[in-house]
Every structure is written in C-alpha cells, then in structure tokens.
Amino acid sequence: MASNILEMRGISKEFPGVKALSDVELHVRDGEIHAICGENGAGKSTLMKVLSGVYPHGTYTGEIHYGGEEAKFGSINDSEEAGIVIIHQELALVPHLTVAENIFLGNETKGRLGLIDWNEANKRALDLMEQVGLHENPVTPVGQLGVGKQQLIEIAKALSKDVKLLILDEPTAALNDSDSEHLLGLLRTLKERGITSIMISHKLNEIEEIADRTTIIRDGESIETIDMSEPESTQDRIIRGMVGRDLEHRYPERIDHSIGEELFRVEDWTVHHPTQPDRVVVDGASFNVRAGEVVGIAGLMGAGRTELAMSIFGGTYGRGISGKVFKRGEEIKTRSVSEAIHHGIAYATEDRKKYGLNLIEDIRRNISAAALFKLTKSGFVNGNEELKVAEEYRSSMNIKTPSVLQLAGNLSGGNQQKVVLSKWMYTDADVLILDEPTRGIDVGAKYEIYTIVNKLAAQGKAVVIISSELPELMGTCDRIYTLAFGRITGCLDVAEATPESLMTLMTQERNAASREGADAEETH
Amino acid sequence: MTGIANVRELLTRNLRQSGIYIAFVAIVALFAILTDGKLLGPTNLTNIVLQYSYILVLAIGMVIVIIGGHIDLSVGSVVALAGATAAVVMIKQGQPWWVGVLAALAVGLLAGAWQGFWVAFVGIPAFITTLAGMLLFRGLTFRVLDNISLSPVPAEYANIATGFQNGLFGGNGYDVFTLVIFAIAVAGYVFSEIRKRRAAIAYKQTVGATPLFITKLVIVAAVVMWFAWQLANYRGLPNVLIILAVLVLVYTVVTTRTVFGRHVYAIGGNLTAATLSGVKVKWVNFGIMLNMGLLAGVAGVVYSARSNGAQPSAGEMFELDAIAASFIGGAAVTGGVGRVTGAIVGGLIMAIMTNGMQLLGYEQSIQNIVKGLVLLLAVAFDVWNKRRAGAR
C-alpha cells in the first residue's frame, strides 16, 4: 500500500460568524487520483485554499503533513515550491500572450544577460505540450484556443513547475465531452508518471470512471472517504453522502402535466457571426414550444445553442439575423431586449456571473433589474415594494441567504441561479429560455432548479432548456430538439429519446461546407 | 423579517459608507484644533461654502459618471467655456443676466450631448472622448474670449455666487431668515426620516433601534442648526448654498429612486447583465454624459459669477478635484458603487483640508502633496475593503 503524500488532519477554518471547515480530514495516497465531492458551499474550495497557502498557516487550525513532513505554507508560492499546483475553475491565463509565454509566466528561465531565450522556451513549451497532448503552435495566442485546450495549457504550466500534487477545481465543468475525455485520459497518464491528483468535481460519472478514492465533504465536515474499487461505491452512495439524505430521483416528478396550445414558435431563424459576416452560425432553425411544455435543445459546444437563444432575445448575438418569431400564433418582433421582455420572453444566460448578475449589487436589486417598470410610478422606483418582492422570491425560491440585502456575489452558485430565475419570473415572462441552468451547481440545488422548472411548466409557461448534459434534458423535458453545426437536425419525444439517438443527431453533418465552418468552431 | 439592528451592525454593515463620515468628522476636528477654532468660525465657514460650491456641483455629476463606469476629464474646460459664453453674451452683446445663465447652461448641455454621442453611440471610451473634449473645449474657450479675460459681469449675475438671502425678518446681530429656512429644512428632514421608518416597519424590514434613531436625528439637527447659526452670524444664507442644496436633494433622489439612477448602477456593476436585462445602455450612457455637461454648465455659471468674469484658463484642474471628491466619497474605481452624498462629503473633506492648510499658512506645494496622498489612501482603503469582503 502506498504511503500518504498528503495528510490534512483536523483542519478547521473560521470566518467571522461562519465556521467554514470543522475538523476536516483529507488523506491522499501517493500517486492516486483523489476526488473531492460536496455540494456548493460545503467547503471544498476553502479546503483547497488552506492547502495551497491562500489562507496561510496560522489562519486555520489543524495540521498539514505533506511528503511526510509538517507543512506550514505562508503563501501560494510556498506550496508551489513544494510541488503543489492548483488549477482553478476560472482559468488564469493571459489571452493575449502566446501558449509558451503563458506556460512560463512567472517562471521564466533566463538565459545570458537575464534575457529570455524564446527559441529555447518555445522548444521546451512544445515538449510540455506534447506531454499533455496539445498539438498547437507554441506562439499561438491563448485567446484563440478553446477552453479545453486552455485547460491543457494550465496543466502543461503545472508540469513545467515539477508538480507532484495537482489540484483541479471542476476541470471539466466548461468542457465538452470529447475534451473532458481527453483530460481524464491525461490525468491517467500523469498518474502513471507518479503525479498525484486531487480533483473537485460535480460530475459523478467522471468520478466513478477515474477516481481511486473519493472524499465527501458536507457542511464543512469530511463525511467519509470511500474506495472506488469497492462494489458498493456507487454514484448513489456518493450522492447520499453529499446531501445527507437519499436522493431517490435526481429529477423531480412532474405533477400537473397538461400541455396546451402552441405558445412560441421560431421559423427559419438564421444568424451570422458578428465579426465574420460570411459565417452562418445558426442556419434556418425552426422550433416551437407549447404552453406547459418543457423543450430541450441539445447540442455540442459550438453548435450554436447560445447563439440561437441570444439572437432571438433582442438580437444580443450576431448580425444579419433573419427569420420569424410567433407568440400565440401572432408574429412578434424581438429586435431589442426590452422588446423581447415586453413580449414575455426571458433568457437566463449560461454564465450567470459574467452575464446574468450584477455581483456587486444586492439580491433585491438583481431580482428587480429586468422588471423595474413594474415597481415604477412616474419614473420613481418604490423601494419598499421592491424589498417586499425580493422577500417573496427569497421564500418561494428558497434562496439561502441571511438577507436579500446581501450582495449577489456572496451567494453560492445554486443560490445565484435562483436569483437569476427570480429575476426572470418577476418579468412575468411566459416563454423562458434557460441556458445551462444547472452548470456548476451541486446535486441538491440542481434538484431545486428542476422543481422550479416543473412549477413554471405547471403554470402553463413555455420553457426551453439548453443543456449539454443529456441525462438532464431527458429527465426534465417533454421534447428535445437537437442542434448540430447551426442546424436543427431532429426533434425527439423524450419517450423515444436515448442518449445514443440524441448524440447521433447532435453530430449529424449536412455537407462538407457546413463541416468547414463547424471545424473552425470546434477546433477552438 | 422585522428586526432591530444595533449600532455595531449599522457601522460595520457598510464600512465604505460609514468610514467616510468618520473620516470627515476626524478631519474637521483635527483642523478645528490646529486652527484654534478659526476653521469653524462664521466667516470661514461661509467662505468654504462660497469657494468650493462649484467643485461640489461638479462632484455630483462626476460621481454619476463614475458609477456608470466612465470618467470625465473635460469638465474644467466645459466650466470655462460655459462661463466664457455667458460673459460674452452679457458683456459684449449686452444681454441681461438670465440670458447669460441660459447660454451657459445650453453650452454645458451641448458639450454633454457631444461627448455623450461619442461615448454612447460610437463607443469611444469616455477617458479618450473627454480627454479630447478637455482640449477641444479649452481651445473653444480661447476662441470665444479672443484670448483675453472679460469682466465685470452684471451685478445680478455675480449675485448668484456671491449674494446672500438675509434680512427678510430683520437682523438682531444674526439673521433670523437663515435660521428659519434651516429650521424648515431640518423639520422636513425629520419628517421624511420618520415617514421612511414607518414605511420600512410597515414592510417588515429591519430598522435601527428607536433610541438610536432619535439620537441620529438629534445629532443631525443639532449640527445643521449650529451651522445655520454660524452662517446667520455672518452674512446669512449664501445663494450658492441654496443651489447646491437643491441639486444634492434632486440628484440623491435621481440616483436612488429613479429608473435612470438604477440603470446607471446596473451598467457600472455589470454591463452585459444590464444589457441582457433590457437596460437601454446607449441612452443611459448618453444621459450620464449629458447630465455631466449640464452640471458643468451650472458650475460654469457659479464660477464665472464668483470670479466676476471669464478667463481663458478658468476651471483648470477642476476635473481632478471632482474626480478626487467622488473617489474619496466611496465611489468604486471599477464603477457600480458610489453615492451623491458620499461625493459631497468627499468634496467637503478636500475643501476642509485645503482651507485648513491655507489658514495654517501652508504653501500650495504642501497642499497638493497632502491632497494627493489623501486621494491615494482613500482608494487604497476602498481596494482593501473590497479584498477583505472578497476573502470571506
């Protein structure tokens, strides 16, 4: 049995008024892939910050033993010195610098006269890129590469620092399936080379596939560490540990399930790229949603899902937009966001932090942001009424916060998403387009979001869910459209849909011309 | 959720906002002691109001610009151009004083619309647009004035900045009228605070404890009435103070209670989120710059009235004072955060420091060094405060 490379013993960390970690134990064996699971806000990130020295020694209690000795990291530099590298969910690369420049950023090898020999650096970069399976030119600016490749660059960067313990925070959250597969394969390769990995993830399939052991954290406490090779170590067991209860169904049952007349229809929708006018991003897409129906749009990254939604929602993406939008059989125009809102259309973005919320504003004002007109009399906002509305949504949506005057930025992902949904529900929208509504949020909160979706449908609203997780679509939708390379390639009733049939449609190409355009997108 | 918040909670809940008031009190106390109380004497207090009113007017517009995530470097030049136009209209063309005022305000609005067009509809960053405007409007000022100063302005016009409202109820060694006006203002303030509190309780919100609330009202009333007493013991109520009070009141309401104000905060906080929430970003940005132009026009009137004429180099560096006032008053460098009252207090901190150092006979060079350091520390405090909040 291998020895432990890392032992975190009895780690407790308090913030004013909050006990973030209490007596956490994390024991990681040399050379294993160790997963950490827990709901958002359970304390995973805090634990990793303690480990990497972001919270220096002395600000927490407990002991860290690393490589057999007690470690007292005073800063992130100390931990990197010791071979611990953390790769955050939000990648820390500089988009305008090249791959090689990014790999050696802060770690530049200086040649004669203290100048950097870029030929040498690029050569070394190429070697590191080879190790992570990245086949690009080292002088390509990082901003031109997709998220998946950027992740690989982060790992190459870690390798350049002689990493011994690699920590990945939700490494595949923003990756498509093939990129995720590649990344997981890479972790296995690194394991063979003796590099230990700690991986924080919400994707239980992945954990089951790759992790040797899994530590579950709940409410700042370590619940258990399970050996994944044991037969009873199933996804259900992990979920049980994470939420502290049995989650019989991951998708709530639809109670009132009556589908009415057609509420929303899009016909022959075509969108061009905003800066490359020749490139067709969405090509003649048509779809409809009926009252009380939940419709999914399944598509791989770059298929044009978000582009389709945003171009409908006030033309916030693209140019050269053509096509028709109908609501209850009548054609409507959605040329601006306020026009779309006025017609009862809502769009919750896939990136709530960047595009969905004003993080430095409180929950109350985020909720009212899109429907201020409802609170306004002759130009004046009724602040008291606004607070009342916010309180109502806090309780009806179960937003977990001490006060609606808290800044939105202080909430966990699931609660932020509830704020976003509250905001759009308050606009009285009856067509809700939800783009990746459960991305980066934990199992328990996901369940709550699905419940809200069901409730919206039961109220007779039309809900469109864009998602890259097929089980999610199959668990929540009535019908699923598939989008491939900008075109709608099919529409399946959920009863007849299988992951395989959907995936076949999602990868269906029309002809060589569209493949070319799609390749440009996909190679990113 | 009806609850009672205690003092500690009120203070710590928003260190950024409460910190500025504490700093203000400390600076006033410091200079009051250093100058043996001269700082707070009737004459000096009146002078501070007269001397810094136009900076405070600019600060009101500037803090809105900054909340929206922009900056305006051109306000000094706009002040000069507005004042110059008013002077030319009145002195060279013999128009009455009110035509001069209207001309100055029109120039301010035009300048604001010009910059608003470039910022909002063409998408040039405000930093560049207003840097260009700074040169452009300064150049135009020289053209309008033919490179020379113009004076004097009509007495009515000068009266805007140098006149007083007094003597209506007779003087008894002090001006009763000033005291009455301030008493009415205090009564209005107390009334509106009580109404706000009642509404808050009706809506089941957390409110401060009653003794605390009363203490706050009594302190504010006492300080304001003492200030009125000092003014009344000199020459009464300055006209500019009335202008300033109206502007502060109007713009506090605009920023906190109108849709426009809320949209400004939304844009500064997260531009994309605001766009995707249906905020008409371009028009709001245009409005921000237009409003700044208007207030620069007002400041132009006040400044030219006070200096009894127009000079080609009037208003130089005013933009920096206004920007500094906003940041000292708690506006965030990245936009989305700030308050009109904060900017006013920030401006007053600058005013008290400058005035105090003048009373103590410090040279201009020392004054600049101190003001520069205070600005730096104020923003450093903001950054530190944010990091503290972020680390949680």
Image (cartoon, coloured by chain):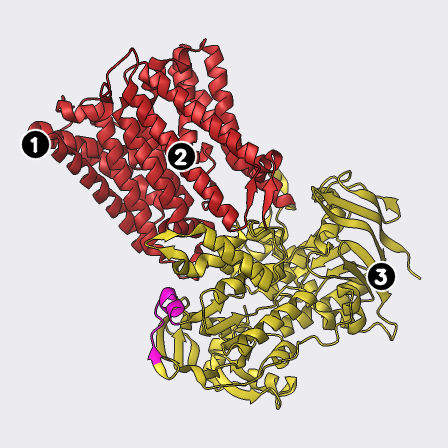
Chain colours: A yellow, B red
Question: Which quadrant is the C terminus of chain A positioned in?
Answer: bottom right
Is residue A39 covered in magenta? no
* Label 1: which secondary element: loop
Q: Mark 3 points at which residue?
A: A224
The residue segment tinted magenta is A331-343
Q: Mark 2 points at which residue?
A: B189
Residue positioned 35% across, 37% down in the render: B249
Relative to A247, is A342 on the left or the right?
A: left
At label 3, counting other C-alpha atoms closer than 10 Å, the crowd grade (few under 14, some 14-19, many 20 or more) is: some
Spot occupied by residue A369 in the image (x, y as percentages of width and height): 45, 57
Task: Give the amino acid at mark 1.
Answer: Gln
Spot occupied by residue B64 in the image (x, y as percentages of width and height): 38, 42
What number is the disc on residue B95? 1
Spot occupied by residue A376 in the image (x, y as percentages of width and height): 38, 56
Could you confirm whether marks 2 and 1 are on the same chain?
yes
Spot occupied by residue A379 in the image (x, y as percentages of width and height): 34, 53
